[in-house]
């Protein structure tokens, strides 16, 4: 079933994450732009080039072709990765000042394009990284992706924060959609399991997943949780995004109830490509 989302809310989330990225990148010195991130093969400069590249694709632009082989780019595993790497190769050699100027110019163009997007176009079903869905869903995925990359950059340069606000709220909405898969398939929760994610922090929320015929996010559990996992929003995001060794983040997670399932869940939350 298509995911219909309010345009003003999602566009506000995009504005929020773009403004936050702009403010963060403006604080960095040249050495910060070359710091490695948790993403294999990418430094901060490459992450920003990737963000710019994806927004250019949405503006109708394509990068020059790039030959990608397992030997030349061992971290690239799929077609989306090859496209991303082409933009990194195209833009990654720009100076920090030029990359930031390009980011600002392309964000301005994207904001204008979004302002002109009709409700009919917003609700039209087509390609998204999560399969066929509405353009509005695609834009929520863009909020999620860029928010995750904000966290990647913050971790790389040692500037904590960014775990609240409209972008974080929408990113968590997007991540909720994957929790049935995470609990049922990744963690192998048994029939009858009732799993509660208690997320803390500025964007904190509670998300419940129940396993009946399949694991599904529910508005309310049919009984007390059989497992409650409590963690900060940022830890949840990094686990779901595969941004760190789960064992390193485990001390920030509290497990109550089915400990075996809880340990398995924390170790297997990563689901992004």
Image (cartoon, grey):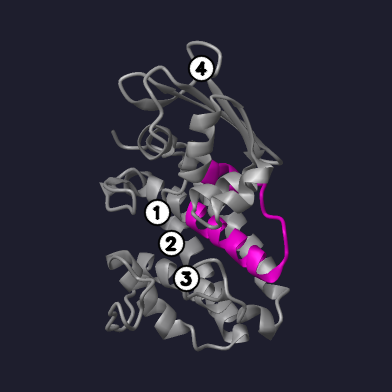
Query: What is the x, y in percent for residue 84?
Result: 38, 71
Q: Element type at marker 2?
A: helix
Query: What is the x, y in percent for residue 16?
Result: 61, 55
* Camera-side mark, 2 or 3: 3
Q: Which residue is mark 2?
A: 113
**Crowding near pointer 3: few (<14 within 10 Å), some, many (20+)?**
few
**Crowding near pointer 2: few (<14 within 10 Å), some, many (20+)?**
few
Give the camera-side residue of 94 and 71.
Answer: 71
Could you tell me how far apart the alpha carbons at marks 2 and 1 are, in whole angstroms? Answer: 6 Å
Q: Is residue 68 left or right of residue 205?
A: left
Q: Are marks 2 and 1 in contact (CB under 8 Å)?
A: yes
Give the camera-side residue of 76 and 82.
Answer: 76
Q: Is residue 8 visible?
A: no
Q: Which residues are magenta?
A: 143-172
Q: Is residue 32 left or right of residue 7?
A: right
Asked if 20 appears above or below 234 in the picture, the reply is below
Q: Are marks 1 and 4 in contact (CB under 8 Å)?
A: no
Give the camera-side residue of 229 and 25.
Answer: 229
Q: Is residue 205 visible?
A: yes
* Camera-side mark, 4 or 3: 3
Q: Are marks 4 and 2 in contact (CB under 8 Å)?
A: no
Most common secondary structure along the magenta stretch: helix
Give yes or no for residue 161 being in the magenta stretch.
yes
Q: Which residue is mark 1?
A: 117
């Amino acid at each position: 079933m298509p995911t219909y989302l309010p345009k003003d809310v999602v566009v506000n989330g995009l504005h929020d994450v773009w403004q936050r990225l702009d403010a963060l990148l403006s604080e960095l010195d040249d050495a910060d732009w070359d710091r490695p991130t948790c993403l294999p093969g990418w430094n901060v400069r490459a992450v920003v080039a990737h963000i710019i590249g994806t927004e250019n694709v949405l503006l109708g632009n394509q990068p020059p072709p790039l030959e990608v082989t397992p030997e030349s780019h061992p971290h690239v595993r799929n077609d989306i990765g090859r496209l991303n790497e082409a933009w990194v190769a195209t833009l990654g050699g720009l100076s920090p000042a030029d990359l930031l100027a390009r980011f600002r110019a392309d964000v301005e163009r994207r904001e204008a394009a979004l302002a002109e997007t009709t409700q009919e176009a917003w609700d039209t079903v087509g390609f998204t990284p999560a399969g066929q869905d509405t353009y509005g869903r695609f834009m929520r995925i863009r909020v999620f992706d860029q928010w995750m990359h904000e966290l990647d950059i913050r971790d790389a340069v040692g500037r904590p924060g960014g775990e609240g606000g409209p972008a974080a709220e929408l990113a968590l909405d997007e991540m909720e959609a994957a929790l049935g898969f995470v609990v049922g398939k990744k963690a192998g929760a048994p029939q009858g399991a009732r799993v509660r994610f208690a997320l803390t922090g500025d964007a904190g929320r509670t998300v419940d997943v129940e396993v009946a015929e399949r694991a599904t996010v529910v508005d309310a559990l049919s009984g007390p949780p059989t497992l409650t996992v409590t963690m900060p929003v940022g830890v949840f995001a990094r686990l779901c995004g595969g941004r760190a060794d789960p064992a390193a983040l485990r001390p920030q997670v509290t497990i109550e109830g089915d400990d075996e399932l809880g340990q398995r869940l924390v170790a297997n939350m990563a689901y992004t490509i």
